[in-house]
């Protein structure tokens, strides 16, 4: 699941009684995880394409919930043409209902800046933001990106960092890996920069390490070919998609995430911190809001991954592990949920 879906699941798991989830298009990984919890969940259009002509069906359903006293706030997590118009429509029908827009990425990505729909998205988001009661963003970086386009919404905007269920994550204090185990978890797309990590690992062949890549995505074949070309087959494995990261992450020593794009946040980094891993990141987007260089992780500025990993292997960064676990406590699902309730009510 992606970050948005994982947050919805964690919210459902934390308080399944007081939340209803309206899923516009069927997404089986999320549905399969939420359904057993007991949350009220409604799927509208299955695999059908969304269109503005279907907005009335959704808005009528939400208005019915409101009339019967079952809903006092709406939170929209997937901004797009459909949901922009939906927010505007709901607010017109029920002005008293709290309608909130949750932004999970750099606004350029939300507006699809490089697409033909960019100007439509930009116009509709501006209109939608005027109608909404609150605009919730997942980091200071995302907040800044939104205000670059829409400075007038500053009073409506609140940062609410994503959180995780910390009880799932345990530090393996008895772990003694002779071979340094490196990990990446996330989507396998070019923007995540996994190819850059692979190229940097060419200079690390003198070290005793293995790098596991967990996830699925359209860039998988390119990465496998790159590994083969660079003769790194014995150093790198592709493990595919894995659920429940907490069940295996604490067997690793280092988490590496060097994206090419500006990350809106980094929930997998929080999971790695909570497990006592040393996180190596760059300065893209919100990552410096999570990692303080030399305190709870390492910000790689000069691409000298070889020397950093050598120091990790020799124990020079072991002190970072305790700080990592302590830092993760700032990003609990309880804090995220409590802040969300406070904002929307």
Image: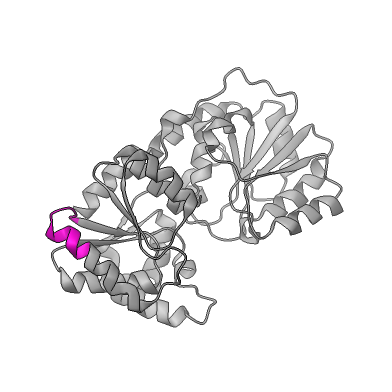
- Location of residue 318 with respect to 26 vertically, above or below: above
Out of 291 and 130, give the one closest to the viewer.
130
**Residue at 21% across / 56% down in the picture?**
73
Tell me if residue 152 can be seen: no
Q: Is residue 188 left or right of residue 30?
A: right
Out of 64 and 309, give the one closest to the viewer.
64
**Residue at 46% across / 60% down in the picture?**
105
Residue 307: x %, y % from top left? 74, 39
Residue 314: x %, y % from top left? 72, 26
Residue 141: x %, y % from top left? 44, 58
Residue stretch in magenta: 62-72
**Residue at 49% across / 49% down in the picture?**
29
Residue 186: x %, y % from top left? 58, 49
Q: Is residue 289 left or right of residue 219?
A: left
Q: Is residue 277 left or right of residue 141?
A: right
Out of 139 and 303, give the one closest to the viewer.
139
Q: How is the rendered protein coloured? A: one colour
Magenta-span inclusion, residue 255:
no
Dividing the picture into quadrants, the one containing residue 183 is: top right
């Amino acid at each position: 699941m992606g970050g948005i879906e994982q947050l919805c699941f964690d919210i459902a798991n934390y308080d399944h009684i007081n939340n209803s989830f309206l899923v516009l298009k069927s997404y089986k990984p999320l549905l399969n995880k939420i359904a057993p919890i007991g949350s009220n969940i409604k799927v509208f259009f299955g695999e059908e394409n969304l269109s503005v002509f279907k907005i009335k069906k959704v808005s009528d359903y939400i208005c019915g919930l409101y009339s019967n006293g079952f809903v006092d706030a709406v939170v929209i997590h997937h901004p797009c043409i459909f949901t922009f118009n939906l927010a505007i429509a709901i607010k017109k029908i029920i002005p008293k209902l709290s309608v909130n827009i949750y932004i999970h990425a750099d606004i350029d990505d939300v507006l699809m800046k490089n697409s033909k729909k960019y100007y439509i998205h930009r116009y509709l988001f501006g209109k939608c933001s005027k109608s909404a009661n609150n605009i919730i963003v997942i980091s200071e970086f995302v907040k800044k990106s939104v205000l670059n386009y829409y400075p007038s919404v500053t009073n409506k905007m609140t940062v609410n960092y994503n959180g995780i269920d910390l009880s799932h994550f345990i530090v393996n204090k008895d772990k003694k890996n002779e071979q340094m185990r490196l990990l990446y978890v996330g989507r396998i797309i070019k923007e995540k920069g996994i190819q850059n990590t692979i190229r940097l690992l060419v200079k690390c062949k003198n070290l005793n390490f293995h790098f596991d890549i967990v996830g699925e995505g359209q860039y998988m074949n390119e990465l496998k070919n790159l590994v083969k070309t660079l003769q790194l087959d014995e150093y790198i494995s592709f493990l595919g998609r894995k659920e429940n990261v907490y069940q295996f992450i604490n067997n690793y020593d280092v988490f590496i995430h060097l994206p090419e794009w500006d990350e809106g946040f980094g929930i997998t980094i929080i999971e790695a911190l909570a497990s006592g891993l040393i996180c190596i990141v760059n300065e893209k987007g919100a990552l410096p809001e999570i990692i303080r260089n030399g305190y709870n992780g390492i910000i790689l500025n000069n691409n000298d991954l070889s020397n950093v990993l050598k120091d990790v292997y020799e124990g020079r960064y072991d002190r970072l592990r305790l700080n990592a676990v302590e830092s993760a406590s700032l990003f609990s699902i309880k804090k995220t949920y409590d802040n969300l309730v406070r904002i929307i009510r």
